[in-house]
Image (spheres, rainbow, N blue to C red):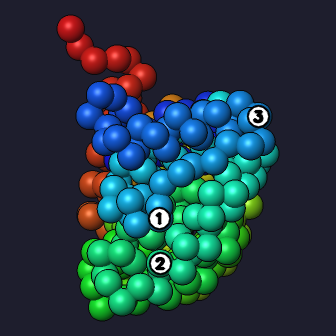
């Protein structure tokens, strides 16, 4: 599973939870976890004596260990820098990035997973090329990786490839990668309908209460494409903030389009149900 979404300024719980760490980890992932803990504790001489090939062979476990370490409270930018320094000291940094160009599709996908988990920004352009890879497993790993990497470059690359990424995957990756500033800019001036759809759905995935008002505006505004208005209703239901209830109710009363009206009614019912709690 993927790690928590980036903070959006609201104290809310993301849809997708952090990976579970437990006894099922491999030997390699366990070793990565121990060395990461040592490095993040400030041990500047820590070295990960594992060849890149072994890391790539257990990419899912290794990526999960890295994600968990970097997602801990207080790690921040300095923690990311420490992890990058650890990879450089261990002669792994360049090997992992270079593996993105491997002729082996399994290796490319594995490298994308690990580079994304470690948030290696030097890999953004390489990984962006993998979004168009002929292998579906590599494409999936590349989109996921851009979501983990985050930052404006990753967001720009995701949106540039929006037409080649399944909408639900695009929305998930965007929800992870984008900052509040990115989301605001994308909502204000989306490049096209697909970009607008992905951005609106990402707001719902982020549980972004800061976007309730603009989402209500989109839902009510008949100048927006119908599918975007429907997505706005879904996003408001996913956010679940009670402040949207009145606006959704007005939409149910005055909307002539039956499909949009039904979407608003479903969202409104969901908000009311949350407000009163589940019946005993």
Helix, strand or loop at label 1? It is helix
Residue identifier under label 3? 42
Q: Where is residue 103 in the image (x, y as percent from the top left)?
A: 36, 89
Is label 1 or label 2 in front? 1
Residue 14 seen in the current view:
no
Q: What's the distance in space between the residues labelled 1 and 2, CA to CA? A: 9 Å
Helix, strand or loop at label 2? It is helix
Vertical relation: 153 (above or below) 274? below
Residue identifier under label 1? 52
Q: Which of 263 and 88 is in front in this view?
A: 88
Q: Nearer the viewer, residue 98 or 269?
A: 98
Graded by Cα atoms within 10 Å as few (under 14), some (14 to 19) or many (20 or more), the crowding at tag 3 reads few
Specify which label sits upstream in the sequence, 2 or 3.
3
Question: Seen in the image, is 147 located left or right of residue 271?
Answer: right
Q: What's the distance in space between the residues labelled 3 and 1, CA to CA? A: 23 Å
Residue identifier under label 2? 99
What residue sits 33% from the left and 29% below the top? 22
Q: What's the distance in space between the residues labelled 2 and 3, CA to CA? A: 28 Å
Residue 265 seen in the current view:
yes
Q: Nearer the viewer, residue 157 or 229?
A: 157
What residue sits 32% from the left and 84% below the top? 104
Specify which label sits upstream in the sequence, 1 or 2.
1
Specify which label sits upstream in the sequence, 3 or 1.
3
Vertical relation: 203 (above or below) 27? below
């Amino acid at each position: 599973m993927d790690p928590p979404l980036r903070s959006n300024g609201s104290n809310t719980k993301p849809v997708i939870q952090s990976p579970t760490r437990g006894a099922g980890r491999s030997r390699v992932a366990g070793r990565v976890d121990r060395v990461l803990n040592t490095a993040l504790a400030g041990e500047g001489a820590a070295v990960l004596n594992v060849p890149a090939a072994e890391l790539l062979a257990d990419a899912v476990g290794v990526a999960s260990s890295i994600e968990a370490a970097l997602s801990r409270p207080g790690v921040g930018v300095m923690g990311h820098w420490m992890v990058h320094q650890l990879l450089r000291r261990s002669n792994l940094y360049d090997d992992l990035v270079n593996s993105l160009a491997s002729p082996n599709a399994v290796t490319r996908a594995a490298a994308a997973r690990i580079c994304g988990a470690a948030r290696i920004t030097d890999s953004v352009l390489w990984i962006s090329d993998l979004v168009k890879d002929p292998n579906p497993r590599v494409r999936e790993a590349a989109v996921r990786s851009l979501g983990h990497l985050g930052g404006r470059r990753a967001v720009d690359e995701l949106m540039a490839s929006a037409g080649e990424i399944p909408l639900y995957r695009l929305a998930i990756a965007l929800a992870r990668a984008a900052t509040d500033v990115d989301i605001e800019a994308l909502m204000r001036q989306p490049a096209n309908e697909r970009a607008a759809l992905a951005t609106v759905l990402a707001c719902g995935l982020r549980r972004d209460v800061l976007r309730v008002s603009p989402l209500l505006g989109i839902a009510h505004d008949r100048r927006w494409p119908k599918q975007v208005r429907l997505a706005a209703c879904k996003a408001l239901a996913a956010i679940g903030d009670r402040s949207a209830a009145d606006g959704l109710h007005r939409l149910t009363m005055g909307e002539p389009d039956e499909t949009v009206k039904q979407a608003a009614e479903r969202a409104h019912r969901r908000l009311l149900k949350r407000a009163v709690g589940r019946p005993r």
